[in-house]
Amino acid sequence: MQDGVLRDLVVGIDSSTSATKAIAWDRDGRAIAEGRAAIPLSNPKVGHFEQDPADWWGSTVTALSQLIRQIDAARIAGISISNQRETFGLFTEAGEAVRPGLVWLDDRATPQQHSFGALFGAERIRSVSGKPLDVIPSLYRMIWLKEHEPEAFARADRYADVHAYLTFKLTGQWLTSAASADPSGMVDMREGIWSEAILTAAGLPMHLMPEIRRPGTQLGEIDEKAAAATGLLAGTPLIAGGGDGQCAGTGAGVLGAGRGYINLGTALVAGTYGRAYAHDLGFRTEIAIAEEGYIFETCQRSGTFLVDWLTQEMMGVPASDRSAFLASIEAEATASPLGAGGVMLLPFWQGSMTPHWDSAARGVIAGLSGSTRRGDLYRALLEGLSLDLALSLKKAMAVTGQPIDRLQAIGGGARSELFLQILADTLDRPISRSEAKEASSLGAAIAAAKGIGWFATIDDAAAAMVGRAAETFDPDPGRVAAYQALAAIYDELWPILRNWNQRRSDVVASLSGEPIG
């Protein structure tokens, strides 16, 4: 109680690539109020994606201010952060950005990825950091900045992921969650600390790095300056959250035995939880939003992005007609036979992460004929995403020994009944559609609920706050067998095309004079 007001809410701040959402949750995991503000994204050159860190903070201020206009700030018992992963900035000690922040979509550091992989060893990188050699971890863009912008790099006093920067703006302290630091590729995953071996080999000073805290522990309190900007009460506890992927997993109930989650967003991310550390090319290992343990995560960069691409770029559907069009084409795809009339799609429009780790990979549509209809293309798109996920999860389960009995689906793609049924059939697992519309914010709120003492553990908090599934899609034995036959063909396709694709890329680059994916 404070001034007669019951402190009965926790806030999960979800700072994603496109927007910041501040959502107040009660002890039962019900969303009570929400504020939201967009974050601009800059694409100054091909392959370069940047944001102004001031927009990370400005959108947070706007979202929190909107929230506080709906509820009494005195009801908020604690706050936690879910952040877009692998996005970071360089700052002075006072919090001024020395240049724009580099977003996870940015792939300018591909040469640094390859050179550091050769220096340190790809297998050693994966053993220490849990991350297969790939351009997305922040490590390689840090090396790029040191090599290409040495003056800006020399002016920096602090490296900060989005969680660390927002923590500084809210509390005045340079701290971050272990589950926000680890996607950088610079954390020793067994110890949960910055890897001295990786930082030394990369020539990156340890003193730049914020201090690391486990999810669910208190980082500090909202200071007077942040309170004046946001409407929060000074002294409100800030609890360590983590990366949006891990927060979404906890918000979707992944901490339960035999559970996994699928986030059907712009990228298609899936994961399962385990207490023992493991690493493999078949997945990325991330620190879980829990007292201990890890998330074994598969990721395909092109998820519902492909639906937008097909709708807007190939079929020219205006935004105003998108909902009606998607309903129509989903009906056509449902009528298309299993196997999409012989069309097979490799969903590598943005390269391949798990399981191939080939940033030069590009999408393929095979089996087209004069009889192919747009419903077949749409079904092939959903089947390609599902078959690719099945390949990755099968490898993850084999290496980690973590069985998955059922999966919880979250994200915008979970609105598609056809997509969920295809996933159930290709994965041979029940797929439940989550009631939680904002699982990343809920995962952060669960960490806050533990951190302020509502629950003894994050697991206990999740058990109380994660809602029940709204609907479950069960696999059909006949379709499961048919998709297993298709999966055998799908699994062979990229290994056959990989060398051809690299030659294609090299020839096109030589003709244009520019690097081509």
Image (tube, rainbow, N blue to C red):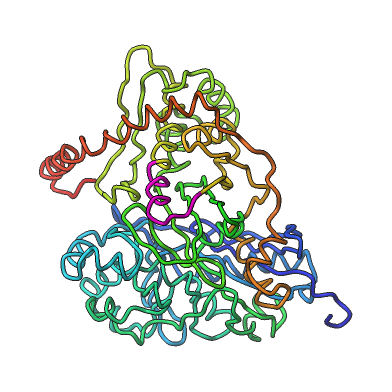
Q: Which residues are magenta?
A: 391-403
Q: Main secondary structure of the magenta part?
A: helix
Name, please, the residue furthest toward the front. Answer: 401
Image position of 169 with respect to 52: above or below = below
The question of residue 437 being in magenta is answered with no
Which residue is at 73% across, 58% downward? 31
Q: Position of residue 57 (x, y in %)?
A: 54, 71
Name, please, the residue furthest toward the right. Answer: 4
Q: Quadrant of residue 15?
A: bottom right
The residue lying toward the viewer, choosing from 36 and 395, is: 395
Image position of 437 (left or right of 334): right
Which residue is at 41% across, 57% downward? 400
Q: Position of residue 221 (x, y in %)?
A: 64, 84
Image position of 8 with respect to 196: above or below = above
Q: Position of residue 79 (x, y in %)?
A: 65, 73
Image position of 457 with respect to 267: above or below = below
Q: Quadrant of residue 490?
A: top left
Which residue is at 45% across, 42% downward? 305
The residue lying toward the viewer, choosing from 478 and 339, is: 478
Q: Quadrant of residue 1?
A: bottom right
The question of residue 395 being in magenta is answered with yes
Q: Position of residue 189 (x, y in %)?
A: 39, 72
